[in-house]
Image: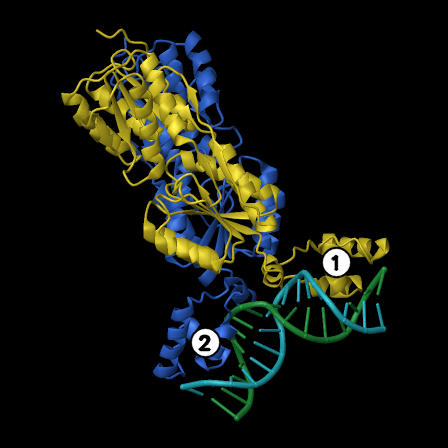
Chain colours: A yellow, B blue, C green, D cyan
Amino acid sequence: MDKITIKDIAREAGVSITTVSRVLNNKEEGMSNETREKVLRVIEKVNYQPNQLARSLVTKRSKMLGLIVPNISNPFFPELCRGAEDEANDHNYSLIICNSDDQLHKEENYLRLLKEQQVDGILLSSKDQLSETNRMQLQESKIPFIIFDRGEEGNQHSGVFLDNEKGGYLAGQHLIELGHRQIACITGPENIHNSQKRLSGFQHALRKASLELPEEFILTGDFKMDTAYRLAKQFLESNHVTAIFACNDLMACGVYQAAHELGIQIPEQLSIIGFDDIPLITALIPKLTTIRQNTYEMGRKAIALLIDTIEHEASERVVFEPTLVVRESTKYINRD
Amino acid sequence: MDKITIKDIAREAGVSITTVSRVLNNKEEGMSNETREKVLRVIEKVNYQPNQLARSLVTKRSKMLGLIVPNISNPFFPELCRGAEDEANDHNYSLIICNSDDQLHKEENYLRLLKEQQVDGILLSSKDQLSETNRMQLQESKIPFIIFDRGEEGNQHSGVFLDNEKGGYLAGQHLIELGHRQIACITGPENIHNSQKRLSGFQHALRKASLELPEEFILTGDFKMDTAYRLAKQFLESNHVTAIFACNDLMACGVYQAAHELGIQIPEQLSIIGFDDIPLITALIPKLTTIRQNTYEMGRKAIALLIDTIEHEASERVVFEPTLVVRESTKYINRD
DNA sequence: ATGAAAGCGCTAACAA
DNA sequence: TTGTTAGCGCTTTCAT
């Protein structure tokens, strides 16, 4: 037996395929209740499911959305995916999740693939700012897209952003309030905008307390645990600080390790503050103080925005506010 | 300007659409190199991308695969996704990742959605055994599917599995060799097959050393950190053991917390061994000893199998072997 | 209230 | 070597 099509239903119910199509799409007008019921019964009986591909071909709406994330292994992104997926499903869209693995060529590849697959829109959580090729591709293909957090600020494209500057500021303020004066910071990659913002917000807070972050106390990381571990270990071996701000939680984990291996007690000898509040960090001992972003909700909002763009050509920039979550890895210090 | 179609290319190149279709699909025969080049030039010039939906409609191949995971927040699954995605892309398929959130109705929903979306096959990492409805749905829709780890053993459906029994055995053997005699185990949900296997393998190892795991030392968890934390805390308050086997790493994290709060030193007073070897556990202090599964490779293999099933109606059951990774959370004990 | 027919963008016989 | 044509499963005018 072959796949059941609309024709089969029509024949079985003794009506035209137009009529079947009407009930499929809940067209109210022009149809007796009797007919509708009859068709519905047949559909039910044979467990018919319309071919979305065929529908898409004529309606020019695939009901599919694409989501490109830079690194699915960072628990930050699964949270984003969850939010995005839930919102998409609520609106009857399906989501194709793609992991660009921090590689530009993969990102380009996915962009092409998603377009071929005729997705109705794309949520782009790019590693970096949008490359010129990609921007052009997207713009000229006229496919609606939304930017998630990363990406430039000057540009006025719609998207969901975090106030990274404020996040960094909160982190700095917290450490200052705890009395810290010797502080280091491990940043994300240099070319990444949100990472820079976190740093500058952080510096801003320090400066307000008349403290300048020395060049050597700014370590350039890459948002990954291993790198942060190596950087921190090397740094802590030959420098004395009482606090470290890691620009994401994964890197904070690396600092924990480094401190542990060097016999440095957290938070007694070293306070650590992270960024993101990924789910797993509650497993760290002591529990990590961090700057929280509501990733799940940001994912939902981003997709909501995307669908709004698709269906009503809306356009908006939403900025989320991060919050400070004080746990156990930061501590008041009496400076000598 | 509207979307560019094959017609536009044909007109522009002065050939028929059939010819264009031929070069698109790399049909070698019957066509002068001249013509091919000409068409290729036009395609290049206008940056034409064929509509995959239209192709699918006639070829009956959507080049899309579905992957349903039970809990994307468990870092185990992003690893699986990465492997699956890479393998799919290598074969020119795209992957729709769905998170069923441990909810049966979501899983059913996704199954329906994936079918409507005409995916060529499904990789199902079901929370539980396949529900009867789902099994029937899948079977009668004739859509190729592969089972990932969870799910029944008796059934002979193709899939990728882990030798969970062996994993449990390795864990038990390790603890025994370290001299532990008072041991507890935190399992996954009772109805989940792989969880049961881990336990029975574990028991097997103990029994070999003439040790029987008392009922009260088997704590039924749910693969989640929080639950394991609560169970472990309650348990450790009133029982004395020298080692705990957590049936996945997330739960081991929960045990860490509990031990920490009770002032129990790991591994001096309590050895802990986990299961999975998820990426983040290297952040735990001390580093977690665990039973490793090669999740990424399992994901790749599963998709390879699925594609093989789709393209050559192959069918196979692959079983991966877990390995013991000794780190710092287990320690030799001199029993008194 | 219902149906016939055209067409979405493409592939695949079959002709020429 | 190339083109004509039918049709994939559906929606949507336009008739009736």
Amino acid type, callout 1: Arg
How many numbered circles does the render carry? 2
- Could you say which is closer to the camera, residue B181 or residue D2? D2
Q: Residue at x 84, y 53 (%)?
A: A33
Please name the residue shown 40% across and 22% down the image. Answer: A282
Question: Label 2's element?
Answer: helix
Quadrant where the C terminus of chain B sits is top left
In-image side of A121 versus A32 (left or right): left
Q: Nearer the viewer, residue A96 or B289?
A: A96
Label 1: few (<14), some or many (≥20) within 10 Å?
some
Percent position of residue A117, x then y: 49, 58
Q: x%, y% of residue A172?
A: 33, 21
Q: Are marks 2 and 1 in contact (CB under 8 Å)?
A: no
Using residue A237 as the reference point, say whether residue B308 is left or right of it.
right
Q: Which of the 4 quarters of the picture holds residue A205?
A: top left
The image quadrant of residue A111 is bottom left
Tell me the CA gap for discs 2 and 1: 36 Å
| Mark number, residue B20 | 2
Q: Is residue B204 left or right of residue A182?
A: right
Residue A26 x, y percent position in the rendering = 74, 52
Residue D7 higher or lower than A300, as above or below: below
Mark 2 crowdedness (10 Å alpha carbons): few <14, some 14-19, many ≥20: many
Residue B35, given in percent of the width and then of the height, sits at 39, 82
Secondary element at image label 1: helix
Q: Which of the numbered marks, if any, corresponds to residue A22?
A: 1
For disc 1, the chain is A
| Dot label at residue A335 | none
